[in-house]
Image: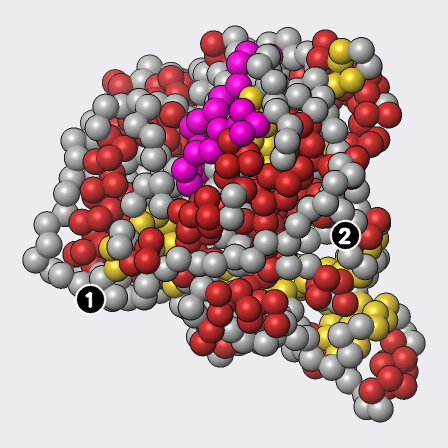
Amino acid sequence: MINLMQGGAYLVNGRDIIADTPDAGTAIQSKTGKAITKKEAARGTIAYSILESHNTSGSMEKLKIKFDKLTSHDITFVGIIQTARASGLTKFPMPYVLTNCHNSLCAVGGTINEDDHMFGLSCAKKYGGIYVPPHQAVIHQFAREMLAGGGKMILGSDSHTRYGALGTMAIGEGGPELVKQLLNQTYDINMPGVVGVYLTGEPVQGVGPQDVALAIIGAVFANGYVKNKVMEFVGPGVAALSADFRIGVDVMTTETTCLSSIWQTDDQIKEFYEIHGRSEEYEQLTPGQVAYYDGMITVDLSKVRPMIAMPFHPSNTYTIEELNANLLDILDETEKRAQVSLDGAVQFHLKDKVKNGKFQVDQGIIAGCAGGGFENICAAADILKGKYIGSDGFTLSVYPASMPVYMELIKNGCAAAILETGAVMKTAFCGPCFGAGDTPANNAFSIRHSTRNFPNREGSKLQNGQISSVALMDARSIAATAANQGVLTPATEFDGSIGKYKYHFDSNIYANRVFDSHGVADPEAEIVLGPNIKDWPEMGALPENLVLRVVSEIHDPVTTTDELIPSGETSSYRSNPLGLAEFALSRKDPAYVGRAKDIQKAEKARMAGEHPCQAHPDVKPVMGVIKQQFPDANHTNTGFGSTIFAVKPGDGSAREQAASCQKVLGGWANIANEYATKRYRSNLINWGMLPFLIQEGELPFKNLDYLFIPGIKAAVENKTEEIKAYVVKTEGQPSELREFTLKLGELTDEERQIILKGCLINYNRV
């Protein structure tokens, strides 16, 4: 089904794969009649040509990218615009779309969600942007319908910013990277590797895009095969997939930890643009005659079968047939793995859902940027026709990804077919994906065509003794399960026909409701600031030395953004930096906030010109030990704050709050064996936090220890590769400093200046 080549590979004439061996040059020459170097062949990828056309550095080794368009939603755009305003924003220099698809429901916090929406509308008017009201479209569907363009690049503040199937290289990043674009700065990265995804065959009936995506994720996530690389989809199998099918695979590439994605384009993509009234945006994209890839994934689409990603990660994949055949064994394995993710905080059971040898699920959801597409819902309707979901505990909710999609489902009868089953149709909303809607009951099991199934992301709260869980599946198999009244069923068992429906896009829906400034700013427009919208607190520059207290120690193999700052109803406080920070690590380490605020007292006193010892009594003995070896260290040149240790933090969401919440609570650093994604590491840097690395297996400190890092400012300035740090031992005899080594990894000159200034806001103010 899926094979990963070891080492690089050449693609010749778009069809022939030649492994990167000493004989590769001869084989290529025999097929093309000419010799080519690896460096020349690397320029033959689609990704290279798009990156080259957007690079402003003059060097394809060190890229400085200017994007064509930006997009954000209502969890992120307030913080982005507030940061940009504090840094001198006067006008959006490029099209910037503000969608309202994450906090569409005002479930908590009184008026604060709608206050943020009005802030977005007023900023679109003042700075010249585009505002998409709640329930009109989820962020990525609007971008596909109205923003994407062949050969273009889009930067979004949501991690699933992926429009590669339409010929657009799109990247999801934390908010500060969008701030840089708004301030006419650049996105700075080394030239990423490019991995080919070579498709052959065509899917059998009942297999959908989520099945293909989960099969790929399961093959590449754990081994990091595509981490921070661009996935380029090529090969004869691409033509067998509709535009909607490609989009459904493409959006899930985020879960592989790749940087971005791009696909070869053809007449089906041309037709997509024509349907949406934007035929001028189509561009045919194909690899060169010879293209070199840093890796090659081959996928035989005909062998893919309906998949399920068990809790609590999209890479925990099995075929549904495999799960049903080995039900108790796999459920037992999942329960054991879950206890690692849940730290044993609650008892997690799945085996009790086996009834008469069948796995009974409690809820089905088809929604959002992954599941809410037109073809997915039409296929689900065909499978459900004439069936009913039953009147017991099982429920099914369907969320079309945009109002134009919803309208067409009403016109072609698919919406009626779904509603007749007892299922519910709802408006465009991302809530089920991140815990702001359809939270299952305690101990319930939900199957969803959405993007993620991290612990508690569906909305349950460990701190309240709650646990429910999500498995990811394709809309087709969710419909087959619903037709079987909750008994887990692969769609390949459906023996009816799944039709092909013609899509008609009604542009009037957006024309009549979306505010589009057409790039014209109105400086006289007044920004609407609700009472929850607060400015960023003052943040100091990096001091000469640092005393850090370890306030959380996480040993899970991977720590998600959702564990660093929970999603769901907590996100309603997103516009209040200090208010939101109260929820940091609340579902992973409830003691974190109190510990971070405790040591922050010393730094607040120092910044106010007072002696830190008076604000925090522990500081005096710590500094006493430090002064024995570093007599010049004192409160005028030494800062105080917190750090966390996590093995591999930052998988998942691009939300900058995972870093900014730590920062406003006095966080100066993270310490990790590696960072799960580039975007999380960038978030740390942009908020002035040091992204320290420590060798795997080496952990000289423990939670609540004090660490001393002398000369950290000079180390950042001088690009020191290895940084000496010390564990401060104040108890026992003798008190001492125990040395260990930290690294920062590669930093650009601009990133170093941001860290030295204390954050991106400070960097742009000076």
The quadrant of the image that shows the C terminus is: bottom left
Amino acid type for the residue under numbered disc 1: Val
Neighbor class of circle 1 (other Cα within 10 Å; few <14, some 14-19, many 20+) is some
Q: Is residue 632 left or right of residue 251?
A: left
Q: Residue at x 18, y 49 (%)?
A: 122
Q: Is residue 608 left or right of residue 403?
A: left
Amino acid type for the residue under numbered disc 2: Pro
- The residue beneath circle 2 is 203
Residue 631 in view, yes or no: no
Could you say which quadrant of the image residue 598 lies in? top left
Question: What x and y, as percent, mark residue 269?
Answer: 58, 67
Q: Residue at x 31, y 18 (%)?
A: 616
Q: Which mark is residue 520?
A: 1
Residue 263 in view, yes or no: yes
Q: Is residue 146 left or right of residue 10?
A: left
Q: Is residue 58 left or right of residue 4?
A: left
- Secondary structure beneath disc 1? loop
Stretch in magenta: 420-443
Residue 560 located within the stretch drawn in magenta: no
Residue closest to the far bottom: 33
Could you say which quadrant of the image residue 618 lies in? top left
Question: What x and y, as percent, mark residue 326?
Answer: 85, 23
In-front residue for pair 374/102 = 374
